[in-house]
Amino acid sequence: MPHWPYPEVNPDENKAAESLYHLLKATALREEDLQPKQVPAAGSGFAVDAATAPTLPTKNAAQFMLSAGYGCLDALKHWLGIQEEQDSQGTYVNLTVRLHGGYPLLRNALECGASALWLMSPESSRARVKRQLLLHLDEVHNYEQFAKTAGLPIEHLAAKRQRVDQFAVAAGIAPWTPKHKASPKTPKGKKKPKQDALPRMTDILRKLDEERSDTLKDLLPWLAAWQLSSGFAHGKMWAATTGNDSVEQIGTRDTYGATFHFSTNLQKLNLITVATYELLETGFARYSTLLGELPSQSETRDGEFLEENGYG
């Protein structure tokens, strides 16, 4: 697809370009903050989690997902080729805006940030550990689907699931009813107990939006940012017409319509990028709290864990 370099004359688009430059520049600062070798402070939330389930630390999973999310934003920076330059008129932001490729990176970043924040959100250590075990089972399931398609052996995966069940018992997690585990027979007239499973991404984001701090309420909802980015990622026309500018090409209109030229709207791209960055930063703030602060009373009790699972 051809590209035409031109100076942007819309001041709002220029302002959005500057915002993107400073925002994406800030993501590089998180690389050192998310080192895998960081040791949780004694008595911190992550330390309590590690004592409960030392084989599958919640810290490692959260760190990996957050790093992947920030990595997507760093890739977005390179995709834009964004940099600050100077000429006789002063300082300006130079970037190359392509029509495809940017929003899928934002979608990935949103999913990584949402999954990490979902994992870390509970105050109860056992609730966090339970979510980590569910995430691990999902990893096993996804690999199994890949292995079946690729013709790779899968016999060893049953033992992996059994070990996760053993971890759950050792951590004192009850109830523990993952989908792979046969549910006990339900007495007649009684409601069948709900099996433990990961919620859908839409449900995770909707819940996180509800719990969003007041300072972030004015930003685009994270779910809306993910929906638009997903539309772009799957090549949907509704997303292209919503997130891009379009100009009718002169001389192309006929009885059935006309041909339009799409170009990326930097204000909308910036809007989604800001929402994505704030989600990752919210996750990083929670990560920092669990890494170093002393646990609250609910960290050492199971009250919120039981309430979350309908037993409070």
Image (cartoon, grey):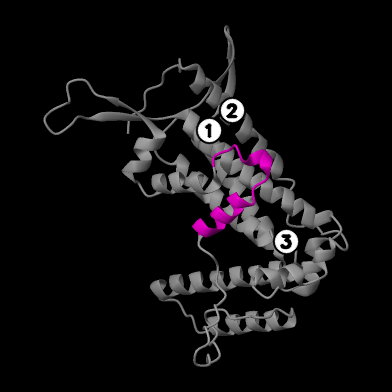
The chief SS type of the magenta part is: helix
**Mark whose residue sits in front, 3 or 1:** 1
**Residue under label 1:** 270
Label 1: how many residues lie within 10 Å, few (<14), some (14-19) or many (20+)? many
Q: Residue at x 69, y 70 (%)?
A: 307
Q: How many marks?
A: 3
Query: What residue is rendered at 68% in x and 56% in y?
Result: 63
What x and y, as percent, mark residue 113?
60, 52
Q: Which residue is mark 3?
A: 59
Q: What residue range appears in magenta? A: 201-220
Looking at numbered disc 3 in the image, what kind of residue is underneath it? Lys
Q: Gap in Å between the C-alphas at discs 3 and 2?
A: 31 Å
> Which residue type carries mark 1?
Asn
CA separation, marks 3 and 1?
30 Å
Crowdedness near tag 2: few (<14), some (14–19) or many (≥20) residues, C-alpha within 10 Å: some
Q: Is residue 245 left or right of residue 300?
A: left
Residue 15 at what x, y percent from top left? 55, 22
Residue 34, visible in the rendered structure: no
Mark 1–mark 2 contact, CB under 8 Å?
yes
Q: Residue beneath label 2, please?
A: 19
Q: Position of residue 217 (x, y in %)?
A: 62, 41
Closest to the observer, 77 or 262:
262
Inter-mark Cα distance, 1 to 2: 7 Å
Q: Earlier in the sequence, mark 3 or mark 1?
A: 3
Looking at the image, is 109 positioned above or below residue 164?
Answer: above
Does 93 appear in magenta? no
Kind of residue at badge 2: Ser
Q: Earlier in the sequence, mark 3 or mark 2?
A: 2
| Residue found at x 34% / y 46% | 236
Q: Earlier in the sequence, mark 1 or mark 2?
A: 2
Q: How many C-alpha atoms fall within 10 Å of the one at disc 3: few (<14), some, or many (≥20)?
A: many
